[in-house]
Image (tube, coloured by chain):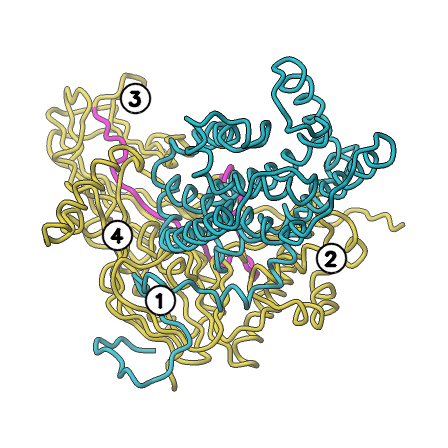
């Protein structure tokens, strides 16, 4: 197959910290260096973008020496943890920002959807916004006119087409915006998680439209999402980014498998020797391990799955009423749920020595995102003896829970999922 | 899909190459042309959204310069007693205000174009030059409306006040004057916009700077009354021949020569091209610094 996108030696540098302070002095420094024929003094101190380790320099590579190519008609899912460089890659491909080094070569027209409804003006009507948004996305006026009816039809907001969009519900707004984008005539389409909006029915329609586009019209699609279900439905191949480098390219299922497995090893098992401990009068926490249902150590879990936490601790004396507990905190530090050994009738008598206990949770309730585990040991009803906050960081990924595409991403204020059953009781038709 | 490390042979055809640096003088003008429909739609958007949010609507286009004229007549005409070259004060000031407003609006709006559009610029590509161009074009619509007001006032003075209109060949230069104002506002606005992405402080200076520049331009006084010591400075301002020229064509009094006009045109073009060049350099990476 012919390549329509070729990326070679692509890197992108970002300056960390506060931008705007000391830039003038730094610019002067740079000019002097350049005038003397030296290399840019700030380009050398780049490090790989591993946000778990604090780097010494204040410039990092968001992407580093990326090489890959995409064939015509392929649908490629771009997978990676937060900060792996996905957004940077998309931004470079969309020409929103330019690379620091390297080159991207593209054949055909490229359209990118980093957001739906870019440039929508609340005062303008739906009709006017279709034209404006279409033009911003690179369509000519006559193209939009030709597709206008199709767009309105797809969006399903025909009745409100001459109403200013500020009176639209958010759902209608998104439908209209996506409808414009879905009718772009480009050979290459770049999509960034825009599917995580709207109602499920509309999402299915969008996924359908995108699938139809890639198969029927031979369009090439690059799709970024945290939603593994959407990626596996839509994409044929996958690219995994890790710390700004390419970790994997190839078949989508192998890619997802690898992505999930890649987070095992060190990060799923943490030695607490260097962690900040509590008073430790009679106990000390030694290590924690997070495991999936098969017992594989990992720091990436899927929502709704079985998972386990192993806690290893040392007792300096025999304890007759020991409580072991742990809880899940979100990034903001809010405690969401706790698991305490005596609540489940677990033994409380432990002798002096090193012990390891395992706690199995049948259903992971936290919505996709990043969370922390805090562990503690104490005598029941007394003050905490040893506690390690943020002992483990883990990531929860989205998956298909009910046979439909789930869209948790847009509910930033929600943290937990619990199964519930729904039935219709009544309807009043007009 | 596969991973390849070898660079592609150069003879193959690619529609687009994304590279860190493009040639300094590559102005993407063809790209801008391809997006001309967007330009038209943005102008329409500005116009529609301007009056949709107000009660008086398009009346504001008239009211604003009229109120300013009344204020100037009172302050500069009556209180300060500045000369208007023998012209009726309202006509003199309104001419200055309409022309100056066009230039000043082009400059200030263009200078904040990156900040105002950071959201759109961060999400989708189109030639960034479209945005400042749409500002200049939107303001042109507004200028045309205000110019109409000026014509009405001129007619009023001719009919009721016995003001003798001396329409002369200089009026034919009006399109040139508008062109100079547009490119000067656009060019200097783009230079400032490019600098403000790095040095935010400049944004605060713009409003002040424009105001200061107005006093260095014969808006509220004719060039002929400026004292010789400052005349040199005022004449160095490319806006000076523009304002004097418009007055000369419309009201029959003004101090403009072919040389000063040529000077204004050439310096505006130089500013425009430097503006486009720095603007194009900044547009590629500005999104990393907002």
Labels 3 & 4 near each other (Cβ < 8 A): no
Q: Secondary structure at mark 2?
A: helix
Residue at (50% x, 76% y) in the render = A187
Q: Which residue is mark 4?
A: A13
Q: Residue at x 55, y 38 (%)?
A: B104
| Left or right, A149 with reference to A12 | right
Kindly identify which numbered label has been placed on residue B18.
1
Q: Is A30 left or right of B224, judged from the image as shown?
A: left
Residue under the point 50% across and 60% down: B126
| Chain ID for cyan | B
Whether residue A296 can be seen here: no
Mark 2 lies on residue: A127
- Report the front residue among A310 and A32: A32
- Pointers 4 and 1 in contact (C-beta within 8 Å): no
Q: CA distance from mark 1 to mark 3?
A: 63 Å
Above or below, comparing residue A320 to residue A131 in the picture? above
Q: Give the secondary structure at mark 1.
A: strand
Q: In this picture, which residue range is highlighted in magenta?
A: A386-414
Front tag of 1 and 3: 1
Which mark identifies residue A380? 3
Q: Quadrant of the C terminus of chain B?
A: top left
Tell me whether the residue at label 3 lies in contact with that at label 2, contact meaning CB atoms closer than 8 angstroms: no
Estimate how packed mark 2 is, as few (under 14), some (14 to 19) or many (20 or more) residues with alpha carbons within 10 Å: some
The chain containing the residue under callout 3 comes to A
Q: What distance separates the C-alpha of mark 3 from that of mark 4?
A: 52 Å
Residue at 34 percent across and 78 percent down: it is B1
Give x and y (percent) for residue A6. Answer: 33, 74
């Amino acid at each position: 197959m012919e390549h329509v996108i070729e990326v070679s030696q692509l890197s992108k540098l970002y300056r960390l910290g506060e931008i705007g302070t000391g830039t003038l002095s730094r610019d002067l420094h740079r000019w002097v260096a350049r005038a003397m024929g030296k290399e840019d003094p700030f380009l050398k101190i780049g490090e790989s973008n591993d946000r778990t380790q604090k780097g010494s320099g204040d410039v990092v590579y968001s992407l580093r020496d990326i090489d890959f190519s995409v064939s015509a008609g392929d649908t490629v899912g771009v997978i990676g943890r937060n900060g792996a460089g996905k957004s940077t890659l998309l931004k470079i491909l969309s020409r929103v920002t330019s690379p620091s080094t390297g080159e991207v070569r593209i054949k055909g027209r490229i359209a990118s959807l980093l957001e739906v409804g870019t440039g929508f003006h609340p005062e303008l009507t739906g009709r006017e916004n279709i034209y404006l948004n279409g033009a911003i996305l690179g369509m000519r006026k006559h193209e939009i006119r030709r597709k206008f009816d199709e767009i309105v039809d797809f969006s399903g907001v025909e009745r409100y087409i001459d109403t200013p969009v500020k009176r639209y519900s958010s759902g209608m707004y998104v439908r209209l915006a996506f409808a414009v984008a879905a009718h772009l005539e480009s050979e290459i389409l770049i999509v960034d998680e825009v599917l995580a909006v709207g109602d499920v029915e509309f999402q299915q329609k969008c996924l359908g439209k995108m699938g139809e586009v890639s198969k029927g019209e031979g369009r090439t699609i690059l799709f970024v999402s945290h939603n593994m279900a959407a990626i596996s439905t839509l994409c044929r191949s996958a690219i995994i980014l890790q710390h700004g480098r390419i970790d994997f390219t190839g078949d989508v299922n192998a890619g997802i498998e690898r992505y999930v497995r890649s987070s095992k090893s060190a990060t799923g098992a943490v030695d607490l020797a260097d962690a900040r401990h509590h008073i430790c009068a009679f106990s000390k926490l030694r290590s924690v391990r997070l495991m999936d249902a098969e017992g594989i150590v990992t720091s990436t879990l899927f929502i709704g799955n079985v998972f386990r936490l192993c806690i290893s601790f040392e007792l300096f004396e025999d304890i007759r009423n020991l409580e072991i507990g742990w809880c899940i905190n979100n990034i903001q530090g809010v405690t969401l749920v706790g698991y305490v050994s005596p609540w489940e009738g677990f033994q409380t008598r432990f002798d002096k020595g090193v012990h390891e206990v395992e706690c199995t949770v049948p259903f992971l309730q936290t919505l996709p995102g990043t969370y922390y585990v805090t562990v503690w040991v104490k005598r029941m009803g007394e003050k905490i003896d040893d506690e390690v906050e943020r002992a483990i960081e883990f990531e929860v990924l989205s998956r298909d829970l009910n046979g439909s595409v789930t869209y948790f991403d847009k509910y930033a204020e929600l943290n937990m999922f619990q199964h519930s059953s729904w039935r219709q009781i009544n309807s009043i038709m007009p | 899909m596969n991973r390849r490390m070898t660079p592609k042979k150069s003879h193959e055809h690619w529609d687009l190459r994304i590279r860190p640096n493009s040639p300094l003088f590559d102005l993407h003008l063809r790209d801008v042309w391809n997006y001309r429909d967007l330009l038209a739609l943005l102008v329409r958007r500005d116009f529609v959204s301007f009056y949709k949010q107000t009660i008086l609507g398009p009346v504001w286009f008239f009211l604003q310069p009229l109120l300013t004229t009344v204020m100037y007549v009172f302050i500069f005409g009556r209180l300060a007693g500045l000369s208007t070259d023998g012209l009726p004060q309202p006509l003199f000031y309104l001419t200055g205000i309409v022309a100056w407003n066009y230039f000043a609006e082009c400059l200030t709006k263009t200078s904040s174009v990156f900040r105002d559009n950071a959201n759109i610029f961060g999400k989708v590509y189109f030639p960034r030059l479209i945005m400042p161009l749409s500002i200049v074009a939107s303001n042109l619509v507004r200028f045309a409306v205000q110019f109409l007001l000026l014509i009405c006032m001129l007619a009023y003075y001719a009919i009721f006040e016995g003001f003798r209109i001396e329409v002369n060949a200089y009026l034919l230069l009006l399109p040139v004057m508008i062109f100079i104002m547009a490119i000067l506002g656009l060019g200097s606005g783009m230079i400032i916009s490019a600098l403000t992405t790095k040095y935010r402080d400049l944004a605060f200076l713009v409003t002040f700077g424009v105001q200061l520049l107005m006093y260095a331009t014969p808006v509220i006084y004719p060039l002929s009354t400026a004292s010789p010591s400052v005349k040199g400075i005022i004449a160095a301002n490319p806006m000076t021949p523009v304002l004097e020229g418009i007055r000369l064509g419309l009201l029959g009094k003004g101090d403009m020569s072919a040389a000063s006009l040529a000077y204004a045109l050439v310096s505006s073009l130089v500013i425009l091209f430097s503006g486009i060049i720095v603007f194009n350099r900044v547009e590629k990476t500005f999104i990393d610094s907002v």
